[in-house]
Structures are given as C-alpha cells and as structure tokens.
Amino acid sequence: MIQLLCLLLVAAADKTVQVRHTDIAPRIDGVLEQVWNQADSIVDFIQSQPDEAAEPTEKTAVYVLQDRANLYVAYRCEARNHPPVGQLYGLEDEFTVFIDPMDTRQTGYFFKLYGSGIYRSGLILDDGRMTDWSWEGVWYSAIKLHEDSAIVEMKIPFKSIRYKRGAGEWGINFGRFIAYNRERDYWVEVTETGGGNRVSNFGRLKGMNPRSQGYYFELYPEGFVRLDQDPGEDARVRPSASLNLKWDLTSVTTLNATVLPDFAQIESDPFSFNLSRYPVYFPERRPFFIEGSELFRMTGIGGWGFRPLELFYSRRIGKAVGEEPVPILSGLKLTTRSPDWSFGALGAYTDRLTDSAGAGLEPRRGFAVLSGKFRLPDATSLGLLFSGTAAPGGDYNAALGADWNFRSGPHRGAVQTAVTADSGRTGWALNSGYSGYVGNFTASGALSVYGDSFSVEDIGYAPWAGMKSFEASAGPVWRGNGGALRRSSLTPGFEFAQIPGSDQLSCYAWIPVEFQFRNGWGMHGSAYGGKGYEADTSYFGRGADLSIWGNSLQHDHNVGVSFNHDYNYRRGYVADHFSDWFTLNYYLLKRVALTFSFNNWWECSPDRDVIGVTSVARPKVDFRIDAKMSFNVYSEMVLVTPETRFGETDLVANRIGFLFSWNFLPKSWLYVALNDYSVDTGEGCQLADRVAAVKLRYLVYF
C-alpha cells in the first residue's frame, strides 16, 4: 500500500502545463474567443470525492495564458449528466485555481468562482492543512452556464500576489466541484491518506515570466458615520475617517499601515454560554490584522487534539472593555517572503480609555510582534516568534517562542516551546503534536506542559497556565467507492491531564464514530468517561454526544444533543449539564436564505434537578440582489427559564440588526448597518444601546 501511495505521489508531481504568452488579452466575459486556441490545455482530472481515484463523471478542460501583467485561466466544463448549478445561496458548482507563485511548496493562494458569479480568494497555509479565507485579492472573473456545459474565465494580476522573481515555474492545481452529485475533481490527485490538497504535491506551471512594471500600491480611505443612542439620552452622531495603506515594496515584500482606524464591527460576536474556567476565543475580523496573519502565528499540523501555542492574539489590540473598544491610534506591519524564509514585523499603539466619569479603564499601550520562519532540508521548518506589550508604570507582558515543524507524506508533527515575562514574573511552556496516516489507519497525539507562571494574558491566548496534558487517538478509516456510505471512522483515544491548581491527574478515555454518506448526510457520535479532578474535587466524569447533518441544493441542517457530568465553574460544583441544538438553512428562489438556529443549555444541581435553562434563538433572512450586493435582517434572543417552568421564561437580551453590503469595485465596499440591543431591566426588555452606521471603504490602487 505504501509503495502504491509513493508511486501516485511521484506521478502527480510529474504533472506539468506550459503557460504561453499572448499579446492579445482575453476578454473576461465567459466566452472563449480565438486567443485561447494557442493555450496549452489539461484534461486529465481525477475524482477525489465521493470516490477517491475514480474517473470523473464529467469532462473538464483547463487552458492557461499569460501576458506581461496577468495570468489567465479558462475552464471548459461538460455537464451532460449533471446540469450546472448557479444559485446565490446553497450548494452550487465551484471552479478553483490553486497556485504557489513563491514555489515554497508550503503556502500559496486560491481563487474560487461559484456558478452564481460569486467569487472568493484566500491563502493556503501549512502545506494545504489550513486555508485563510480572509485574504482578499484584486482579480477578475466571469462565468456562463449552459444546459450541458459551463465556461469560466479568470484574470489574476501579477501585482495582486507575491511571486518569486525570475522563477520560470510555479506550483499549480485546478479543482472543480459539481453540486448536483457533490463531486470534487482535481488535476493533481487529492486523497485523504495523502494529506489532502497539499501544496508540496502541486503540478508544475512552466514558462512563467511576469513582466509587469512597478509594484502594487493600495490606498484605503475610509469614512464612517455612527449614531449612538442610550436610554434617556439624545442621539450622538460621531463621524470619523481613517487611512489605510498597502504598498508592495518588491514582489515579495509588503508594507501595511493604518492611522486612526475605526474597526467597529459591523456584526457583533455571537452570544456564548460558557461553563468552563477559560475565556471564549473569538476569531479576528479586522482587515489590518487579517492580511499576513499566517506569519504571526505558530504552525498547526491538522488532525484532532493539537492546538498551537498562540503567543499573539490580535484581538488583544483594541480589545473591548465592557461594550467600548479601546481606540487604536496607529498600526504598521512589514512582511516579506522567499521560498526558504519569511519575516514579519507588526507594531500598534492604542489610546487611553476612560469611563463617563473620566476614570481610567485602560492605559495607553504599545504592541510589537516579530516573526521569522525558515525552511530547512527534508521538509522541515523552524519558526521564531516574539510578542510583547507595554504600558506606563512598568506594566508589560512579553513572550518568545520557537517552533519546529516537520512533514513526510501524510505524516505531520510539531514541537513548540516558549518563555514569557509578565511584569517581573517568568514562565515557560512546551507543546508538541503528531497527525498522520498509515494506509487506512489514522493516528494523532498531543503533549502540552504549561508552567504555573506562563502568561500571555495581555498579548496572546493561553489562559491555561499550569496545565499538563497528554492525549492520543488512533483507529481505522473506511472508504466506500460506489456505495451509499462514502466514509466512516472509529478513532478511540485517551487523555491524562493535570488541571491548573490541582495536584492529581484526570484520566479519560473516549470512543468516537463517524459516518459520511454520498447524499451529503452524516452523523457523529462519541462517548467518554474517566476520573476527573478539578478545583480540589474528585469525581467520575462522563458524557456523550450525537449530531446529524445533511444538505441538498435547497437546504442544509445540523441537529444534535450532548450530555456531560463534570465541574460547572459557573455554579462551583460537579453536576450534570445538557445541551441541544438545531440549525436550518433553507434557500428560496436562489436569492433568499432563511436561517433559524436554536440552542438550549440545561444546568442541573448535584442532586440532578434541573435548576435552569438558557436558550438562544437566532432567526435570520439573507437576500442577494446579485453576486456583489446583499442585505440581511437578523435577531439574537437570549432567554432564561427557572428550573423547567417554561411559562416563566424571560427574555433577558435581544439584539436586532440590519446589514446592507455592496462590493461595488474590487476591495471597495459600502456598508449600512443598524443594531438595537435590549436587556432585561426587571420591567421587561428595554433598549440599552442603538447603533446605526454607514461605512465606505474605497480602494485606490496602481
């Protein structure tokens, strides 16, 4: 089996396509004119899902051209058996180009066009184990769907991407998704045991010769008008403006800057019900911190159980204190890459935040992050990361970490270590993990040791100082080609952990099982049990969960339930607690999506009596006018029920929002938003805050 896998990898690596130069630029209109006849083409696609290594059910041809300033790609796709699907919501056909222009064989870009004309782009990280959808490039596309075919054209300006100057070859792969039967086809074969769509396994795009003059420059002026109204007060109108800059100093080096940015979130973070001792982690959404963020983090390996050390958590900069974000005065970021190394430097400065009485809530603070990643022989890499913040009066927090990452075929591992200093107190941490396949057998594991004084509270995210844990899981994965069952797995595992503040080990074992069917449905179930020791309390912890999901061209859903018996930090004792959830997305008339989700959290006393139920309901209506313009109306209602007396259920919080967005030019957006937030005052839900905002982001680029 291993020999066969090696032969497949060698064969895939030999795939090449020649890019030819044209003096006549193709029109990006979804019509293949005569100029495409001079292009080299590829037709030998291989199915990845639902049947690995099978012949595709439809034929696909791809053509590649270049001129001095752009790369051009065209798809000619047959759809004789499965009509092409283009709808603004729900499953639809997809066409994706993956490129590695730096020839790193680890990172790259993807450009995805949907049947409806919606387009997305992003970064490929960690040799394809992770993707970052937040990167937004300037590129152009067009698609035309016919009864038995689809025609796609893409134009990718060389100035929009970082590429290795003088390199005559790039890594490349092409993908197609057929929505009608949920089929994924690739030019270079993609298998689960081979590690997925790995950058190191891309084919070769030969004959590359970018000759564009100058480098990309983006100037982002932003205007923001915000109206705030608190109960019993007059509305306050607060206009503001900011300036953002992006300058590609060379084909591999980029400078980003921001002055007086208004990073007010258009959509609020969702309500989260937290029974653990650790704070909730929220993803980054702010453009300045998103671009190039892969350089300011330690490397992940994929697989279950391993989480990289997060010495820099960008949401610490401009964090919210109560409902008010700390103002950011300025930020500066420099990133540079080559096939063998990359470097990043980030600095930011935040203003002082005071309450209505003038009392200081947060001092002025400076932030600095430095990162270097170096590619070593034999598919290994070394990374170094420094992060720090300081405020007047000797308040500082800093961390220095090293990251060693290795990979070999479907095997991936990492060893990470760090030291921290927090206002005179020092700490350390060690983190390591492995994930991989041997034939149809998968295994993963992680070892983490955090010193009692390890702290990145002001700059990173690692709240579990003093935690020591080891976990491992392994088991078979079955794949069925041609039957109703597409994939199933059984991966039992165990964990030994010492919780911070405890001197005894918690020991757990679990058995998860998962089934994925060809029709888009699936289910996952697991059960665990073992000795738990937290907060000087010993108990027998146990739990189980079950979730079922499914999708079609008109809807998708997820429903599930879980039970746990463990320590409830919200109440301060060991007890049962349950949760259940239901989410339904229904796609109406190809332009409208109706979404409803409902979550319940049931808390019990140590005597197993239900003491309260917290519920969250989120109805939402999305409407797309076209591929670039949409609006939605949503609500988030938080309800609390004493014991099981549902007739006494109170609405304790309600957020109602409206958002209109228009992508009128590349990377240029108009937003109009309204948020009403109400809370229970004892006399019913009363308005606590009203925010209306108009925001314009306009890109000037040359």
Image: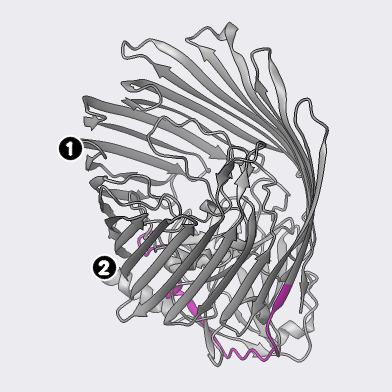
Q: Which residues are magenta?
A: 192-218
| Number of other residues with Cα within 10 Å of mark 2, as a class: few under 14, some 14 to 19, many 20 or more | few
Mark 2 vs mark 1: give the one in front. Answer: 1
Numbered mark located on residue 455 in the image:
none
Would you say residue 202 sits in the magenta stretch? yes
Kindly identify the amino acid type of the residue bearing the numbered disc 1.
Leu
How is the structure coloured here? one colour
Would you say residue 235 sits in the magenta stretch? no
Left or right side of 279 for 101: right
Identify the element where label 1 is drawn.
Answer: loop
**In this figure, which residue is indicated by the disc labeled 1?**
505
Query: How many callouts does the rendering have?
Result: 2
The tag earlier along the polypeptide, 2 or 1, is 2
As measured in the structure, the alpha-carbon distance from the residue carrying label 2 to the one carrying label 1 is: 39 Å
| Number of other residues with Cα within 10 Å of mark 1, as a class: few under 14, some 14 to 19, many 20 or more | some
Q: Against 355, is 477 above or below?
A: below
Please state the horizontal and vertical placement of residue 272, each as a whole percent of the image.
Answer: 52, 34
Quarter-wise, where is residue 530 in the image?
A: top left
Please state the horizontal and vertical placement of residue 680, each as a whole percent of the image.
Answer: 64, 19
Dominant SS in magenta: loop
- Res. 589 visible in picture: no
* Residue found 16% across the figure and 36% down from its top: 504
Left or right side of 610 for 651: right
**In this figure, which residue is indicated by the disc labeled 2?**
2
Furthest-left residue in this view? 504
